[in-house]
Amino acid sequence: SQQGEEDPQALSIQEGENATMNCSYKTSINNLQWYRQNSGRGLVHLILIRSNEREKHSGRLRVTLDTSKKSSSLLITASRAADTASYFCATDAKPTDKLIFGTGTRLQVFP
Amino acid sequence: NAGVTQTPKFRVLKTGQSMTLLCAQDMNHEYMYWYRQDPGMGLRLIHYSVGEGTTAKGEVPDGYNVSRLKKQNFLLGLESAAPSQTSVYFCASSYLPAGYGNTIYFGEGSWLTVV
């Protein structure tokens, strides 16, 4: 069964707007990662947040983690058409030698 | 700068045929993974390996076999393909266990259609 579930499944915005996508998971974790997938390509790592962190930034990306609610959010500020992709959260699972991915959010940014 | 390379990229199989997907990584990674990606299902782990000569089952291992005879290669086999195995297959690798907050690196995917 999936550990993570992203919400919304799809999101369409205009360039310059902010995009927020959420991830909920089921069991306790040590880390949560976000990955990006361009159409027809493999996944690329974006950012990692550890369970003892509440917020992390990387460029235009801001990730929050609420372990009490078992949820995370990814905010992309000032979006660009090139941000059009699917975004996945991934959590560790016991035993922690592998990642379990969520179902993804498809983001479309219109010029 | 090859990273993780998958072959073939596209393949059409008839039901009951067998085939092998090859994954090769040139980063000296210990850990390798095979995922399948289906619409609305995200990525699901099929099998993984924690080092040369080892394999372990993931979430959806039925109908697949794997081998890790060499550290740099991880093979995924379908002995008797079924239409339910139509999917996009991704190989990935990592130097340390992915679950300990380590990044994993993905190949570009292999599109498999079983008719």
Image (cartoon, coloured by chain):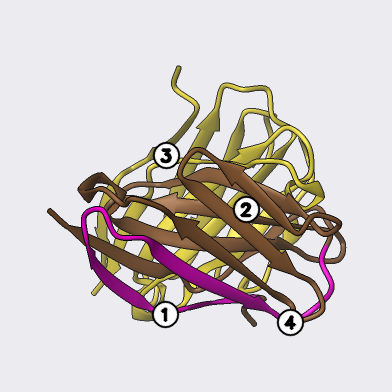
Chain colours: A brown, B yellow
Per the image, the residue denoted by label 2 is B66
Q: Secondary structure at mark 4?
A: loop
Task: Give the residue drawn at x 73%, y 32%.
Answer: B95
Q: Principal SS element in the magenta part?
A: strand
Q: Callout 1: few (<14), some (14-19), or many (20+) C-alpha neighbours within 10 Å? A: some
Label 1 chain ID: A
Q: Is B49 left, or right, of A34 in this rendering?
A: right
Task: Give the distance between the C-alpha atoms of the residues marked 4 and 2, in whole angstroms.
Answer: 29 Å
The answer to whether dots 4 and 2 both sit on one chain is no
Tell me, yes or no, if residue A82 can be seen here: yes
Q: Quadrant of residue B56?
A: bottom right
Per the image, the residue denoted by label 4 is A26
Q: Quadrant of residue B51?
A: top right
Per the image, the residue denoted by label 3 is B6
The percent coordinates of residue B93 (x first, y second) are 62, 39
Task: Give the distance between the C-alpha atoms of the residues marked 1 and 4, in whole angstroms.
Answer: 17 Å
Residue A18 sits inside the magenta stretch: yes
Q: Callout 3: few (<14), some (14-19), or many (20+) C-alpha neighbours within 10 Å? A: many
Q: If you read the primary sequence from the N terminus, does the residue marked by circle 3 or circle 2 appear first?
A: 3
Q: Which residues are magenta?
A: A4-29
Quarter of the rendering occupied by the N terminus of chain B: top left
Quarter of the rendering occupied by the C terminus of chain B: bottom left
Residue A27 sits inside the magenta stretch: yes
The answer to whether residue A74 is above or below residue B63 is above
Q: Secondary structure at mark 3?
A: strand
